Image: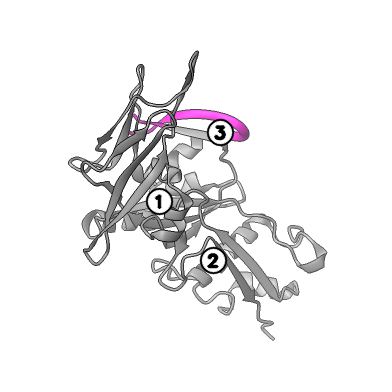
């Protein structure tokens, strides 16, 4: 979440690549189009640690290593997961072909906590924190099936749209109050968790066979309806408003009813290369599909 403000300087078109230094001086890598993000979820996941002396760089030719990850669960118990054949995220190409790191060492981003790896090449020593940078390198069977340590619990759903030009970096980058409250809670009470921002680009709203509804409903209204729909289905603990949408007699609900909309179908996909989204009310899934009935208000 600390990197969300960097989106203001991130690339704005497909195929573009840019590196931006964060407040600590570390380089963040952005590739692709980072414009148009108007819906966000603040989610928490377990902090990952590397078990001491568990790293085994067993295949330098193909860049494969194994290790043990562990987390502290909310009930205080320790859970460990064995990671086999994890692929090095970096390699170099020279006259001899593709070359993976000569050595991998366990490092720490957090003082005293072995939570990152350093990949040793002859001319560079890049370091990556496991939770934020290396989870995509884990096999999908670990991220989605055999363990829940990578899953993302939705704590809050919000939007940033204004007249259509305001984006997520404009809201979270200015220190949104709910974001600050969640981060403070993690710092003082739930120190076994990390917080992440999951960003979405809303698609077109359609009305049955009549196609796009943007003529009848403005884009800011579409974003508002999508936010309220997601809140009413996931029911995150920190969202107190819109929990009863569309049965709350709100303006967006009446607007849909006046247009003759009877059902909304909303899809929210879990991040492709991380864990699965869930809340206390909704079980973990790769893809969440919701059918929402719009009342007639008559």
- Compared to residue 249, the image places residue 212 above or below, namely above
Visible in this render: residue 122? yes
Mark 1: give few (<14), some (14-19) or many (20+) Cα within 10 Å. many
Question: Which residue matches tag 3?
Answer: 11
- Compared to residue 281, the image places residue 53 above or below, namely above
Between residue 211 and residue 62, name the one nearer to us: 62
Residue in the image at 22% along x and 63% along y: 77
Q: Is residue 14 magenta?
A: yes
Residue in the image at 46% along x and 65% along y: 284
Left or right: 130, with 276 as reference point:
left
* SS for callout 1: strand
Q: Which residues are magenta?
A: 11-27
The location of residue 96, given as percent across then percent down, is 48, 16
Left or right: 271, with 72 as reference point:
right
* Residue lying farthest to the right in this orientation: 210
Question: Which residue matches tag 1?
Answer: 196
Q: Which mark is residue 230?
A: 2
């Amino acid at each position: 979440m600390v990197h969300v403000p960097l989106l203001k300087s991130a690339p704005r078109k497909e195929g573009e690549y840019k590196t931006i230094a964060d407040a600590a001086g570390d380089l963040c890598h952005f590739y692709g189009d980072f414009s148009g993000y108007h819906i966000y979820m603040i989610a928490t996941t377990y902090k990952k640690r590397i078990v001491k002396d568990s790293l085994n760089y067993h295949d330098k030719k193909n860049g494969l290593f194994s290790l043990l990850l562990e987390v502290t669960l909310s009930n205080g118990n320790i859970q460990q997961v064995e990671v086999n054949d994890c692929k090095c995220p970096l390699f170099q190409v020279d006259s001899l072909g593709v070359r993976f790191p000569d050595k991998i060492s366990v490092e720490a981003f957090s003082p005293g906590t072995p939570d990152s790896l350093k990949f040793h090449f002859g001319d560079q020593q890049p370091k990556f924190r496991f939770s934020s940078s290396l989870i995509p390198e884990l096999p999908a069977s670990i991220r989605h099936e055999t363990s829940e340590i990578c899953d993302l619990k939705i704590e809050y759903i919000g939007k940033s749209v204004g007249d259509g030009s305001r984006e997520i970096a404009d809201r979270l980058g200015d220190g949104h109050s709910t974001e600050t409250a969640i981060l403070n809670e993690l710092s003082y009470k739930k120190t076994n968790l990390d917080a992440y921002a999951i960003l979405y680009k809303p698609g077109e709203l359609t009305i049955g066979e009549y196609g796009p509804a943007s003529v009848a409903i403005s884009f800011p209204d579409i974003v508002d309806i999508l936010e309220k729909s997601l809140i009413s289905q996931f029911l995150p603990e920190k969202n107190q408003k819109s929990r009863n949408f569309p049965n709350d007699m709100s303006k967006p609900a009446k607007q849909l009813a006046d247009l003759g909309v009877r059902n909304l179908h909303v899809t929210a996909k879990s991040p492709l290369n991380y864990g699965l989204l869930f809340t206390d009310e909704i079980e973990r899934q790769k893809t969440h599909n919701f059918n929402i009935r719009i009342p007639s208000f008559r």
